Image (cartoon, grey):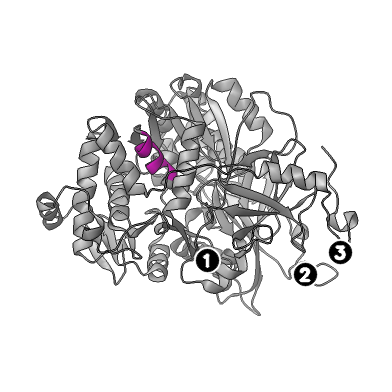
C-alpha cells in the first residue's frame, strides 16, 4: 500500500490515474449482479405464501406468524387506502418499537405510499418540525403518543376502539394495483428518513424500493437468514438501520424479536434478551458495541452467529475485543442515509491489523469513486473525497431540489447516471479495500447518528443572549466523544446555560444537545479570519461543590463514579447534581450502572437512571 499523497502534487491539471490504476479501480467497481425486480411488499408476500405458519415477529406476549402478519398489514393497508393513501404519498409512523411498528411499516408500503418512521424519543418540537416539512397524507400513532403529534394530516390511532373495529372488518387479502389505483413499481419511493441539516432544519431523504431491495438481497447473500434465525430489532426509528432490521428477516423467512422501546440503551437488558430469545443476528453502532461488551455476561450470548456494526468508524481494538468475547462473526458496514443503508461491507478478521478502519468493498450494483477537488479519480493509496454511485442512491431530498442538485451530481464516468458526494475522506487500498479517514466538513457521527454541527449552532444562536457560537466534538477522554458548545455573549448579556440547555432539549434529539457550554470573550480565529476549532479550549472542570457532600458508602461510590465517567473532580459533585445535566449520556450511564453492579452486586436498569439521575436518588435505589 502506498503512502497518502497530495493529489495536487501528483498531477496538476492532468489525469491522475495510469491505465493500470484505472483498470484496478474498474475491476473493484465491477459489482453488477442480477437482483429480482420486486417491491418490498411483493417480497414479504412471497415469504408469507411460502411459509405461512412460520413465526414472523414477536414482542413480549404478542406473536404473529407470517400469515397473521401479512393479514394484519393488509387490513391496515386497506384502511390507509380508504383514507386516501396513494402512490407518491408519505405516511408517517409515530409509533413505539412494537409489533404494531412492524405491521405499520409493511402496511404503508402495501398502499404504494412511502413510510416515514419518526423516533418517539424526539422532543415534541422536533416531531412537529419533521411532520410539517414532510407533509404526510396520514399519521399512524397510538393514544399514548397522539398528544405529541401536531399535524394537519389525518390521524389514525391504532389502539382506538373505532380503529380496532374497522381493522377487524377490513379485507385481509393483499392489495392489488387496482386497489391502489396506480401500479406500484421498484422505482417508487419506499421510505423517507430525516437527518440533521446544515441549514438549521432536518432534511428528508427519499429512497426507492429498488435501492433497498438491492441491499437486502446482497445482505442475504452475505449472511443467509432462514428458519431458526432470530434478528433483534432494537435500532431507533430515525436511524436507517431499522429499515434493514424490519425487512431483511421478513424477505428471508426469519423471525423478528422486537426489543422494548428503550431496550437499545440498556446493555444488561440486551444481554438478557439475546440469551433468553436465542438471538442469532443483531446490529450495533461501535459505541454501543463497546458498552455491550463491558457487560460481564456478554460472553454468554452464544446464540449470536453474526453481529453487524455500522454508523461510526469501527476501531481495530474494538474488533479485537469483540473477537475475544464472542464467537460470532463481525460484519463492518458503511453507508450514508442517502444510499440505502449500506454501500460497503467487510467481515472483520479476528486479529485485525493496527491502523485506520477498513470499510470493505462495494456491495452489489454499487460503485465507489475517490476524487480530488476537480472530481478526478485519484490513484489507490491517495486520499480524496468518497463519492457513491449505483442503484442504491436515494432519489434525493424531499422538497429540496437545490440541495439534491448540490449533493447528487452527474457521474462523469458513467453517462446518464448520478453520484452522491459523501463528504467523507477515504482511499483505496492496493487490495481493493476502502479505508475511511473521517469528514471534510462539520458533519459528525454521535452514537451512530449523523449530526450537522451547523444545525446545533443555529439552534444555540436563537438564544438572544448569545452573539456567536461554535459547536465541536471533543474526545478529551479516549473513546468518549462529547458535543461542546462555545458561546460569546451578546453585549451586556449573561447567557442562562440552564435555560439554553432546556430549550435545546425541547428542539433537538438528545444526542444533539451539547453536554458542556463554555463562555468565551471571543472565538479564536486563524490568520485568514476563519474559526480555529483546534484552539477552542477544553471545558473547565467545576471545582466547587454546590450541594450537600455525600454521606454513606452508596453516595460516596456514586460521586466517585460520576467523577470518573464525567471527567470531573469529586469535590465538585453534590448529591443533588443530575448526571445528565453534568454532561452524561445514555452510554456513559450504562457504564456507570455496570460499575455499580461490579462494586455492589446490585443491578439497576437504565430507565431507573433516567428517572432518578442524581446521586441521592440513585443511592436510594441501591438501598
The reply to whether callout 2 and callout 3 are in contact (CB within 8 Å) is no
Q: Which residue is mark 1?
A: 500
At 22% from the left edge and 30% from the top edge, which residue is drawn?
A: 53
- Mark positioned earlier in the residue sequence (2 or 1): 1
Q: Residue at x 36, y 39 (%)?
A: 251
Q: Answer with mark 1 or mark 3, whichever residue precedes in sequence.
A: 3
Q: Label 3 near label 1: C-beta < 8 Å?
A: no
The residue mark sitting in front, 2 or 1, is 2
Query: Which residue is tagged 3?
Result: 13
Question: Which disc is residue 530 wearing?
Answer: 2
Q: Can the viewer see residue 10 in this picture?
A: yes
Disc number at residue 403?
Answer: none
> Residue 152 at what x, y percent from top left?
29, 72
Residue 568, can we see it? no
Disc 2 crowd, CA 10 A, few/some/many (<14, 14-19, 20+): few
Q: Position of residue 559 (x, y in %)?
A: 55, 39
Majority secondary structure in the magenta region:
helix
Instruction: Name the mark nearer the viewer: 2 or 3.
Output: 3
Give the Cα separation between the discs numbered 2 and 1.
26 Å
Relative to 9, residue 558 above or below: above
Task: In this rendered view, identify the residue nearer to me: 100 or 478.
Answer: 100
The quarter of the image holding the C terminus is top left
- Give residue 264's quadrant in the image: top left
| 245 magenta-colored | yes
Q: Secondary structure at mark 3?
A: loop
Callout 2 secondary element: loop
> Residue 5 placed where, x, y %?
85, 49
Q: Give the class, few, some or many, for how many residues have Cα within 10 Å of label 1's Cα (few <14, many ≥20).
A: many
What is the distance, in whole Å, between disc 2 and disc 3 at their CAs? 28 Å
Amino acid at each position: 500500500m502506498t503512502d497518502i499523497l497530495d493529489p495536487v502534487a501528483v498531477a496538476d491539471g492532468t489525469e491522475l490515474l495510469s491505465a493500470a490504476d484505472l483498470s484496478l479501480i474498474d475491476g473493484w467497481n465491477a459489482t453488477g449482479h442480477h437482483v429480482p425486480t420486486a417491491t418490498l411488499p411483493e417480497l414479504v408476500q412471497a415469504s408469507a405464501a411460502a411459509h405461512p405458519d412460520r413465526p414472523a415477529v414477536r414482542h413480549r406476549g404478542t406473536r404473529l406468524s407470517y400469515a397473521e402478519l401479512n393479514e394484519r398489514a393488509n387490513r391496515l393497508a386497506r384502511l390507509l387506502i380508504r383514507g386516501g393513501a396513494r402512490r407518491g404519498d408519505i405516511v408517517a409512523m409515530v409509533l413505539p418499537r412494537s409489533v404494531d411498528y412492524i405491521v405499520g411499516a409493511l402496511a404503508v408500503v402495501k398502499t404504494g405510499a412511502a413510510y416515514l418512521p419518526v423516533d418517539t424519543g424526539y422532543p415534541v418540537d422536533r416531531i412537529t418540525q419533521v411532520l410539517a416539512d414532510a407533509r404526510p397524507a396520514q399519521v399512524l400513532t397510538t393514544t399514548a403518543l397522539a398528544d405529541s403529534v401536531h399535524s394537519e394530516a389525518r390521524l389514525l390511532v391504532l389502539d382506538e376502539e373505532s380503529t380496532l373495529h374497522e381493522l377487524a372488518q377490513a379485507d385481509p387479502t393483499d392489495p392489488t394495483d387496482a386497489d391502489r389505483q396506480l401500479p406500484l413499481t421498484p422505482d417508487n419511493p419506499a421510505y423517507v428518513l430525516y437527518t440533521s441539516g446544515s441549514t438549521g432544519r432536518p432534511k428528508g431523504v427519499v429512497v426507492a424500493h429498488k435501492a433497498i431491495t438491492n441491499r437486502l438481497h446482497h445482505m442475504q447473500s452475505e449472511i443467509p437468514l432462514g428458519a431458526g434465525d432470530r434478528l433483534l430489532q432494537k435500532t431507533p426509528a430515525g436511524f436507517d438501520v431499522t429499515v434493514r432490521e424490519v425487512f431483511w428477516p421478513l424477505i428471508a423467512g426469519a423471525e423478528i424479536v422486537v426489543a422494548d422501546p428503550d431496550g437499545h440503551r440498556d446493555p444488561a437488558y440486551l444481554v438478557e434478551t439475546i440469551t433468553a430469545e436465542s438471538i442469532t443476528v443483531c446490529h450495533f453502532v461501535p459505541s454501543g458495541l463497546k458498552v455491550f461488551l463491558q457487560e460481564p455476561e456478554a460472553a454468554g450470548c452464544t446464540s449470536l452467529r453474526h453481529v453487524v456494526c455500522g454508523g461510526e468508524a469501527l476501531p481495530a481494538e474494538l474488533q479485537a475485543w469483540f473477537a475475544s468475547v464472542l464467537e460470532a462473526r463481525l460484519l463492518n458496514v458503511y453507508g450514508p442515509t442517502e444510499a440505502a443503508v449500506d454501500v460497503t461491507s467487510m467481515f472483520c478478521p479476528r486479529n485485525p491489523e493496527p491502523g485506520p478502519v477498513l470499510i470493505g468493498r462495494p456491495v452489489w450494483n454499487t460503485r465507489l469513486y475517490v476524487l480530488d477537488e476537480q472530481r478526478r479519480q485519484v490513484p489507490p493509496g491517495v486520499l480524496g473525497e468518497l463519492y457513491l454511485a449505483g442503484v442504491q442512491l436515494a432519489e434525493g431530498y424531499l422538497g429540496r431540489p437545490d440541495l439534491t442538485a448540490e449533493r447528487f451530481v452527474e457521474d462523469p464516468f458513467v453517462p446518464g447516471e448520478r453520484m452522491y458526494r459523501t463528504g467523507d475522506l477515504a482511499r483505496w487500498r492496493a487490495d481493493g479495500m476502502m479505508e475511511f479517514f473521517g469528514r471534510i466538513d462539520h458533519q459528525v457521527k454521535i452514537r451512530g447518528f449523523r449530526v450537522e454541527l451547523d444545525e446545533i449552532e443555529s439552534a444555540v444562536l436563537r438564544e438572544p443572549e448569545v452573539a456567536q457560537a461554535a459547536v465541536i466534538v471533543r474526545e478529551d477522554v479516549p473513546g468518549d466523544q462529547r458535543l461542546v458548545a462555545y458561546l460569546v455573549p451578546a453585549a451586556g448579556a449573561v447567557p442562562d446555560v440552564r435555560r439554553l440547555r432546556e430549550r435545546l432539549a425541547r428542539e433537538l434529539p438528545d444526542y444533539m444537545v451539547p453536554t458542556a457550554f463554555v463562555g468565551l470573550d471571543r472565538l479564536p480565529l486563524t490568520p485568514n479570519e476563519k474559526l480555529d476549532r483546534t484552539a477552542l479550549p477544553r471545558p473547565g472542570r467545576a471545582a466547587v461543590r454546590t450541594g450537600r457532600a455525600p454521606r454513606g458508602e452508596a453516595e460516596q461510590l456514586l460521586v466517585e463514579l460520576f467523577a470518573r465517567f464525567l471527567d470531573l473532580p469529586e469535590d465538585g459533585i453534590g448529591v443533588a447534581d443530575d448526571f445528565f445535566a453534568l454532561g452524561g449520556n445514555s452510554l456513559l450511564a450504562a457504564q456507570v450502572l455496570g460499575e455499580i453492579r461490579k462494586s455492589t452486586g446490585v443491578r439497576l436498569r437504565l430507565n431507573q437512571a433516567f428517572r432518578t439521575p442524581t446521586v441521592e436518588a440513585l443511592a436510594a435505589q441501591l438501598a
